[in-house]
Amino acid sequence: IRGSFSQWHYPRSLRDRQLIQLTAKEFDLLELLLRHPRQVLTREQILEKVWGYDFMGESNVIEVYIRALRLKLEATNPKRLIHTVRSVGYVLK
């Protein structure tokens, strides 16, 4: 997984030598997933690490950001990296 990301620094990351523009939260989410490859992260873990304990936003905020991140990552390479683990969370593989 890491091999396909040669650099990852906000606000841009490289996937397979293609530049990807990310928002701050998209970058934080990608960084969290990259730091825990092949490990299923629950929605609660993602909310805590990316948004913080006191986040009171929309209930679908993770899904919205995962979708946006997938669209950006798959625009440069159609291979899906972020997978949904139903009723649990997400995994990068």
Image (cartoon, rainbow, N blue to C red):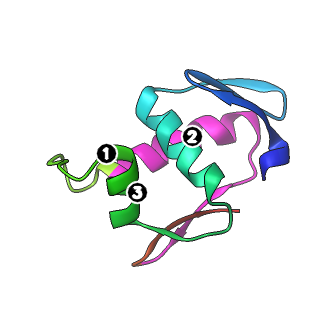
Q: Can residue 74 be found in the magenta stretch?
A: yes
Above or below residue 86? Residue 75 is: above
Residue under label 1, please give it: 51
Residue type at mark 1? Answer: Trp
Q: Tell me the SS state at disc 3.
A: helix
Q: What is the span of residues highlighted in magenta in the rendered image? A: 62-86
Q: Which is nearer the N-term, disc 1 or disc 3?
A: 3
Q: Find residue 19 and report its image quarter.
A: top right
Q: Which is nearer the N-term, disc 2 or disc 1?
A: 1
Q: Main secondary structure of the magenta part?
A: helix
Q: Nearer the viewer, mark 2 or mark 1?
A: 1
Residue type at mark 2? Answer: Leu
Q: Can residue 44 be found in the magenta stretch?
A: no
Assign the C terminus to one quadrant of the image. Answer: bottom right
Residue under label 3, please give it: 46
Tags 2 and 1 touching, CB below 8 Å: no
Residue type at mark 3? Answer: Ile
Separation of residues labelled 2 and 3 (CA atoms): 19 Å
Viewed as shown, does residue 77 lie left or right of 70?
Answer: right
Viewed as shown, does residue 40 lie left or right of 1?
Answer: left
Residues packed near mark 2 inside 10 Å, few (<14), some (14 to 19) or many (20 plus): some
Q: Tell me the SS state at disc 2.
A: helix
Residue under label 2, please give it: 71
Q: Name the outermost residue toward the left.
A: 56
